Image: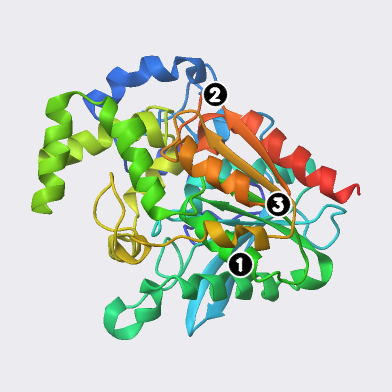
Amino acid sequence: VSKPPECNASKLEFPFEDCSSQSHRPSRREVLQLGVASAFLACIPESANAEALLSCTAITPDWCEPGFKRFSIAVNGLDVACWVYGDLKHSTQLPLVVVHGGPGFPHTYLQPLAQLACDGRPVIFYDQVCVGESECVADLKRDAPWTLTIDYYLAELADVIEYFDLPEKGYHVLGHSWGSVVAQLYALRQPAGLQGLVLAGAISDAQLYKRAQEDFILSTLPPHIQAAIDKAERDQQYDTELYAAIAEGLTSFYTVRTSPKPDCVQSAFDNVNEQIYTAIQGPSEFTIGGKLKNWSITHKLAGIQVPTLLTNGKYDTMQPPVTDAMAEAIPNVQRQLFERSGHMTMVDEPGPYNVAVQDFLSSLELK
């Protein structure tokens, strides 16, 4: 995978490394799963390194190697790393600000969305503080306790938007997974300049999410697997080899169905800030805890005043009851289901996903 011509080769200047720089070597299990990804293998150049059997740029239709610029934005005394793809100054299309999931996952897995810049739409990514290439501290609880709260991330998003003077120019926001939590809360403030909202793999009620996981996913598993998950939950032991293997199996079906994981996805999984993830989401993959345990804003969603696109995959961890409740509550909403996708729709179906987002945002700008 070639680098954009205007980017330096250092890690700080290029967040998505080329194939030869990937440290992940697929396991035998991952290699055996290649049949699932056979449709994608024709896209991989013969020279691709075996350490990165799939690359996010190769599986993204119409990828054009859009150039980007990297910025550092000071938020609460720590530098937030930010990347702008496309021409923010001269584009006739409004920029899309992308809020990554996790919490604690770097933005890299969202790389296919940068293809929107090939169609002329500037795309702004950032790593939330203490995630990916953003600055962190040695002891979060002691030196940056606000990183373990939900409210901080609204202020962080607002600071990124303000840094680029977007309130005056107009902009859209896309939030994926945990990023949808931030995006919804931000939109409820009715901020200046916000024109459209995309909520991908979204959640507005933590306990409804938990029940939907149990009813639509966990209940379909073999009884002995259900028993193993129940035991881990009961004993609060999530670091066993069996639990890790079960989590990996479910991840390959419900989180990202493209298997083996493409380079930008594997990079995100390899660089999760576990402390932030556990504090906000909780330690378990199959339920929800932490700061989000009893979080719900469905009753407030009528306050979102901008047009909203609600997307999810057929095999998404966000099952129908979760998205149905949101669709009923948001006044001006469109929905789109991606039939071959898990939670990371922009990775499992990058072409159709980008078309859907671009069509939706463009329709708002024509009015």
Q: In the displayed structure, would residue 85 be above or below residue 70?
A: above
> Which residue position is annotated with label 2?
339
> Which residue position is annotated with label 3?
331
Q: In the displayed structure, would residue 89 be above or below residue 155?
A: above
Within-10-Å neighbours for mark 2: few <14, some 14–19, many 20+: some
Q: Secondary structure at mark 2?
A: loop
Mark 1 residue type: Tyr
The quarter of the displayed image where residue 141 is located? bottom left
Mark 2 residue type: Glu
Q: Along the horizontal axis of the image, is 11 left or right of 139?
A: right
Q: Disc 1 vs disc 2: Cβ atoms closer than 8 Å?
A: no
Q: Earlier in the sequence, mark 2 or mark 3?
A: 3
The quarter of the displayed image where residue 164 is located? bottom right
Which residue is found at the position 36% from the left and 19% from the top?
34
Mark 3 residue type: Pro
Q: Nearer the viewer, residue 207 or 349?
A: 207
Single out the mark in the foreground, 1 or 3. Answer: 3
Within-10-Å neighbours for mark 3: few <14, some 14–19, many 20+: some
Q: Secondary structure at mark 3?
A: loop
Within-10-Å neighbours for mark 1: few <14, some 14–19, many 20+: many
Q: Nearer the viewer, residue 57 or 217?
A: 217
x and y percent of residue 122 in the render? 74, 53
Q: Disc 1 vs disc 3: Cβ atoms closer than 8 Å?
A: no
x and y percent of residue 201 in the render? 51, 43
Q: Is residue 256 visible in the rendered structure shown here?
A: yes
> Which residue position is annotated with label 1?
186
**Disc sitting over residue 322 in the figure:** none
